[in-house]
Each structure stands twice: as structure tokens, then as C-alpha cells.
């Protein structure tokens, strides 16, 4: 088959609908970035921005909201409530039989209903987080303008923040449905990307006149580069299980008999275990950080809140231990709920079509063998992903360059993972159009 010319590529670009999808995705991201710049009425942004700069938890949340939280914009809650609601609904679906039936047996209609439950729960979480956030702001000295009506300001701000969170959820779903890539991941990706110039500027100022720090920065960047390579390997690596297909004779011709394989991804969840782990850890951390601002009369309660806050703080060792364990656990969870990675279903389908794994009997033995392979593959992928997430963070402390901590391993994994997913989807669109042209010829 001849190689496609420039005219062929331009034709594919227009005919496959890829251009429209990319333009739509770009416009939706622009809408999100615009909303992230619109401040909430009645707030002195600089007061909260100063606190965000010195608070690890708020700074981390601000990174994933694309700076919207630090600016106290109408999108201050970002995609967080939607991601948290998605986690809870997916976890509950495993426990409650009726929800599990919706997810596994009722096809597209069941998934739509689960999506509706997720949206409703997102609204509930948005209201809760808005109320907590506004209570936190009310305790900050001079954060709220003196000439506003406190009661009306509180209610209107909660309503605006909730509406902003729901709008971000809607934008992410539109991108997933009509654009390119996963909407939620792309919004986080853009948020991280928008913070890179600030981190780079702070780092250049810090190392400008210090030779030791310049060497440390070179080492840190080399570790980041190695982490990016490891992430790409993790995202693309698969364990191929050889499948022998039966031969069929139709007249004088023999069909089939060719060997194929089942690809088990080393990292089946992609970037989602990372995103979900952060959401799970930051939710209680945020609440504890805000509760810690309150004036408790009991010294015991104060001490408990401070201790829990320190344990779950992104700067503490306990946080990274929990982070690693959550990544491993959520990677296994994703592998268990993915339809194309269910050993029993795969074994049944192979038996139905007369295919088999060499040296293993069809049916239950095949299911058990696939389960062992999948468990080993997922374990390697989960531990590898957890290690990749921790090493650059450790390097940040060793080199003593904390200004790049915001774009550490977590952000790298998300950015590289989302970029790979985006490239793969673009490639799929172009290949589909290429095959259509070939078949017409």
C-alpha cells in the first residue's frame, strides 16, 4: 500500500471529524481557563493567595484547580467534587448488588443511570465543600470586604461555587463525549500546565547565584526525565497471552488457525489511580486544615486535629506511605472492574469460539491461569506506578529544591499519561480514516 501524501493527510484531517473534535476541546478548555480567572465577589484575593502559598494542602489543591482556588474564582472547587463523587459511586457499585448490576449487566442504559447518580452526588459534595470553604474564609482576618452583607454574601457565594463546580463537571463531560480525551484528566492537565511558568520562575530565582543548588537542579531534572521515560514504559507496556484459534474449512479453503494474543496492560488504570489517590487523601486533609482554624476550647481536641493534620499533610512521610498504598490498591480495583480484564468472561468467550491458551484446558483452568497472570501483571504495574510516584518527591527533598515540588512525580504522571492518551486517540481517528480510504480503493 502506498504511503499517504500531504493531500491524503489533509483529506483525512477534514473527513475524519478530528479537526472539529480538537477545536471543540480547545474551546472548552478556554472556557474553563476563563472561569478560573473570574474572582468571587466580596473576597480580597491577595489574603487567601498568601495563605495558599504557605500551606501545602491548599497549594496542592490550587495546583489541580489550575490556580482557581488561589484566586478564589467561581471555579475554585474545580473538578475535585466530580472526581470524589466518581470514586465513591464506583466503590459503592462493588458493594451494592443493584448498582453492580447497573454497571455490568444493563449496558449503556445502566452506565447512564450511574452517571446520573454521580452528577447528583457531585452537587451534594459541591454544596458541602462550598459551605466549609466559606466558613474557612470567614475566619480569615480581612479576607472578606467590610461593606458586604454577611448572610447574603455567604449564601450567594455557596451558590456560585456550587454552580461553578457543576459547570466544570459539565465541561469535562462534554470534552469526553464530543472532544478528544478524558475531560476530567484534561482539565487537571491544563491546570498543572498553567502553573509551570510560575514554578520555573521561582526556581530560576532561587538557583541563580548558588552553584550547589544549580547542580541539585540538574540532578533533579535528570530524575524527572528518567521518571517520564518510566511513565511512558508503564503506560505502553502489555503482557501478551498467546491464543490459539481453531481452523475452519469452507469448501476448499481453510480459514483461521492463526495465533493471536490477549494484551493485559501493565497499568490498566492509566492516570486514574493517581488522581483518585490524591482526591481521597486531600479530602480529609482539606477538612482538617480548615477545622484547624477554629478556636477549640478543649486542648485535647486541638491536639488531635493538629496530629491528624500533620499525618495527612503532603509534606509528611505518613502521607507518602498512604499515597503508595492507595495507588497499589486502586490499580487493583481498576483492573477488577474493567470488563475486558475479567478472567472468567475471557475464558468463557475463548471456549465459545473454540480458542485456547497453549497447554491449558478450556473453561475453569483457563480462567484460573488468566487470573494468576493478571494478578502478577497488575501487581508489577501497581508497585511500579507507586515507586515512580515517590522517587522524584524524595529527590526534591534530597536536592533541597522545593520550588518544583508542585510539578513533581504526581503531576508528571498525570501530564505524560494524559498526553499519551490524547496522542493515542488522535492516532486512532487518523488510522480509522486511513482504513476507510483503503477499503474504498
Image: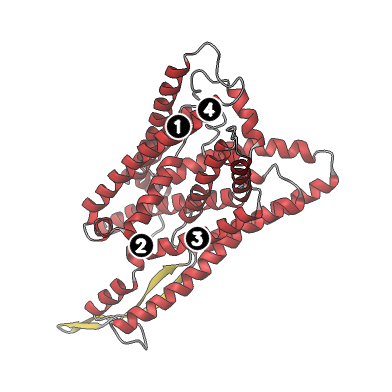
* Residue on which disc 4 sits: 72
Q: Earlier in the sequence, mark 2 or mark 1?
A: 1
As drawn, the residue found furthest toward the left would be 251
- Mark-to-mark CA distance, 3 and 4: 35 Å
Question: On the rendered structure, is 416 left or right of 82?
Answer: right
* Residue on which disc 3 sits: 235
**Of marks 2 and 3, the one in the foreground:** 2
Q: Earlier in the sequence, mark 1 or mark 3?
A: 1
The answer to which image quadrant residue 92 occupies is bottom left
- Mark-to-mark CA distance, 1 and 4: 11 Å
What numbered label is drawn on residue 393? none
Camera-nearest residue between 355 and 203 = 203
Question: Residue drawn 61% across and 19% down?
Answer: 142
* Residue on which disc 1 sits: 130
Question: Residue drawn 41% across and 21% down?
Answer: 156
The picture places residue 369, in percent across and down from the top left corner, at: 38, 81
* Residue on which disc 2 sits: 337
Camera-nearest residue between 425 and 241 = 241
Q: Earlier in the sequence, mark 2 or mark 4?
A: 4
Mark 3 closeness class: few <14, some 14–19, many ≥20 residues within 10 Å: many
Q: The C terminus appears in which quarter of the rendering?
A: bottom left
The picture places residue 7, in percent across and down from the top left corner, at: 39, 46
**Of marks 2 and 1, the one in the foreground:** 1
* Secondary structure category for the residue under label 3: helix
Amino acid at each position: 500500500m502506498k504511503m499517504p501524501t500531504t493531500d491524503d493527510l489533509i483529506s483525512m484531517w477534514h473527513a475524519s471529524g478530528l479537526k472539529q473534535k480538537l477545536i471543540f476541546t480547545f474551546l472548552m478548555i478556554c472556557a474553563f481557563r476563563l472561569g478560573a480567572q473570574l474572582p468571587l465577589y466580596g473576597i480580597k484575593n491577595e489574603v487567601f493567595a498568601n495563605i495558599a502559598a504557605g500551606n501545602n494542602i491548599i497549594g496542592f489543591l490550587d495546583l489541580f484547580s489550575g490556580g482557581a482556588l488561589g484566586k478564589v474564582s467561581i471555579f475554585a472547587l474545580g473538578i475535585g467534587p466530580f472526581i470524589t463523587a466518581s470514586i465513591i459511586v464506583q466503590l459503592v457499585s462493588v458493594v451494592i448488588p443493584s448498582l453492580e448490576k447497573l454497571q455490568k449487566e444493563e449496558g449503556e442504559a445502566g452506565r447512564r443511570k450511574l452517571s446520573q447518580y454521580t452528577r447528583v452526588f457531585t452537587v451534594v459534595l459541591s454544596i458541602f465543600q462550598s459551605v466549609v470553604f466559606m466558613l474557612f474564609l470567614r475566619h480569615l482576618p480581612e479576607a472578606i470586604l467590610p461593606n458586604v452583607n454577611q448572610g447574603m454574601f455567604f449564601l450567594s457565594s455557596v451558590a456560585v461555587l456550587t454552580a461553578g463546580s457543576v459547570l466544570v463537571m459539565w465541561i469535562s463531560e462534554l470534552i469526553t463525549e464530543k472532544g478528544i480525551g478524558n475531560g476530567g484528566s484534561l482539565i487537571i492537565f491544563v491546570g498543572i500546565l498553567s502553573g509551570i511558568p510560575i514554578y520555573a520562575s521561582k526556581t530560576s530565582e532561587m538557583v541563580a547565584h548558588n552553584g550547589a543548588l544549580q547542580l541539585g537542579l540538574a540532578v533533579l531534572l535528570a530524575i524527572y526525565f528518567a521518571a517520564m521515560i518510566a511513565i511512558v514504559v508503564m503506560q505502553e507496556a502489555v503482557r501478551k497471552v498467546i491464543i490459539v484459534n481453531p481452523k475452519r474449512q469452507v469448501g476448499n479453503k481453510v480459514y483461521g488457525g492463526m495465533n493471536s494474543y490477549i494484551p493485559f496492560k501493565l497499568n490498566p488504570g492509566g492516570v486514574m489511580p493517581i488522581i483518585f489517590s490524591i482526591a481521597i487523601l486531600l479530602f480529609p486533609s482539606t477538612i482538617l486544615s480548615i477545622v484547624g482554624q477554629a478556636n477549640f476550647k478543649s486542648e485535647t481536641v486541638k491536639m488531635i486535629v493538629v496530629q491528624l493534620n500533620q499525618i495527612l499533610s503532603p509534606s509528611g512521610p505518613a502521607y507518602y506511605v498512604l499515597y503508595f498504598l492507595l495507588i497499589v490498591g486502586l490499580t487493583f480495583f481498576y483492573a477488577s472492574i474493567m470488563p475486558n480484564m475479567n478472567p472468567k468472561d475471557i475464558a468463557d468467550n475463548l471456549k465459545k469460539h473454540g480458542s485456547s491458551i497453549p497447554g491449558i484446558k478450556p473453561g475453569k483452568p483457563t480462567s484460573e491461569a488468566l487470573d494468576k497472570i493478571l494478578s502478577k501483571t497488575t501487581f508489577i504495574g501497581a508497585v511500579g506506578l507507586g515507586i515512580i510516584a515517590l522517587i522524584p518527591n524524595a529527590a526534591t527533598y534530597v536536592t533541597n529544591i522545593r520550588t518544583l515540588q508542585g510539578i513533581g512525580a504526581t503531576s508528571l504522571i498525570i501530564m505524560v499519561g494524559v498526553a499519551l492518551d490524547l496522542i493515542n486517540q488522535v492516532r486512532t481517528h487518523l488510522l480509522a480514516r486511513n482504513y476507510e480510504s483503503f477499503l474504498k480503493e
